[in-house]
Amino acid sequence: MNKPRILTIFGTRPEAIKLFPLIHALEADSRFDSRVCVSAQHRSMLDQVLSIADIRPNYDLDLMTEGQTLDELTARALTGIGKVLDEEKPDWVVVQGDTTTVVAGAIAAYYRKIPVCHIEAGLRSGDIYQPWPEEVNRRAVGTFARLHCAPTQTSADALLKENVDPACVHVTGNTVIDALKWVTGRIEAQPSLASGLVDLEKRFAGKRIIGITSHRRENFGEGMQNIANAVKRIASRDDIAVIFPVHMNPNVRAVMNEQLEGLGNVALIEPLDYPHFARLLDISHLMLTDSGGVQEEAPALGKPVLVMRETTERPEGVEAGTAKLVGTDTETIVRETEHLLDDHEAYALMARAHNPFGDGHSSQRICDLLAAG
């Protein structure tokens, strides 16, 4: 009897981080024939994760082009992945999350009646423009995936409310916790993997470090300006330092460089590879972010998260107390950050709150579900 062929498709750094533990598990499991296709919708940031996780794709579509529009990227991803599916004829297609690669890969599989396994299924913000276009991408895949691997019961309940067959919905936890445990173990065994922040750690010794990430499309323009202004205000304190890996998108870089470059206790640095980002989470006192993944990762290391968005498709963190929505209003960001800096009890409540997103064993659960068909 032939082993079921599993084709895992992804294209961005966050997808790669959340899928490499599952790919490792699939490759180590004698029940499967595991294959990998990357769209490379993000090129260099994706390659960093492939390298550290030792993932060698069977197909690399190399789709990234400068200034690409969403419709151009979607069209190229749909046709490129379709050709791979015609060649591979997999028994399952696995996608993760909500990117353009996810929706294109899932639709290409649907067109060929190949069942889709959707990892991190069921996240909903309730606003089709926040996050944009990810909210609609995720909802679309949720209408026809065969296997929905929800990270939490809240996510599973969202799918059930949309009349998804309960037999197809399973709470598996989030594979990002698997990934974080793997990489922190690697760093502990080989500290040189994340030694690139040592100079900054020495430079900011004695200060509480605030880690910042910001890249969401819906924050481009006024929102990004407000975030930069807030960081500038917060950085006027002598007792803190800011480490800010600045996203490569010019809508982010131009604003942050203009507002923050040259400030003594602000380090604007290049995007970090995964081990160094895990190290940043570890040394940070708290995180300010508009990212989805950081809302899941930082609490696993006991770090409070202030979410610079108006809504989140990860309400579990807010409900558990590990994260707080602060939006993109400058005054609100400054006020909530200083509250955590100055109120030790408020900080401790967030730092000690239970992380609702997983236990580090999600990949094995997903393998067992795929094997069961």
Image (spheres, grey):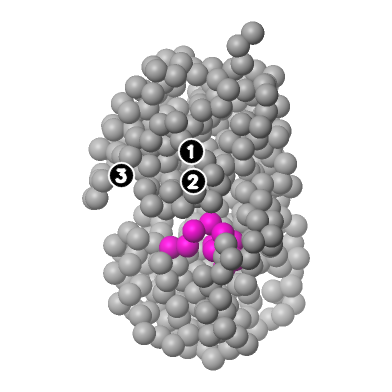
Residue 246: x, y in percent?
Answer: 40, 66
Q: Main secondary structure of the magenta part?
A: helix
C-alpha separation, residue under disc 1 versus residue under disc 3: 18 Å
Q: Residue most toward the top?
A: 1
Q: Does residue 131 appear in this view? A: no
| Tag 1 secondary structure | loop
Kind of residue at badge 2: Leu
Q: Nearer the viewer, mark 3 or mark 2?
A: 2
- For the point 49% across and 49% down, which residue is it? 51
Q: Quadrant of residue 174?
A: top right
Q: Along the line of sight, which residue is nearer the eye, 126 or 6?
A: 6
- For the point 57% across and 42% down, which residue is it? 20
Q: Along the line of sight, which residue is nearer the eye, 92 or 138?
A: 92
In which quadrant of the rendered image does the C terminus lie?
top right
Residue 10: x, y in percent?
Answer: 46, 38
Residue 17: x, y in percent?
Answer: 54, 47
Earlier residue among tags 1 and 3: 1
Earlier residue among tags 3 and 2: 2
- Where is 186 relative to 336, above or below? above
| Tag 2 secondary structure | helix
User: Which residue is labeled 3 in the image?
Assistant: 64
Q: Which span is picked out in magenta?
A: 271-281
> Mark 3 Cα within 10 Å, few/some/many (few <14, many 20+)?
some
User: Which residue is labeled 2 in the image?
Assistant: 50
- Where is 233 relative to 62, above or below? below
- For the point 74% across and 77% down, which residue is it? 345
Residue 341: x, y in percent?
Answer: 63, 80
> Mark 2 Cα within 10 Å, few/some/many (few <14, many 20+)?
some
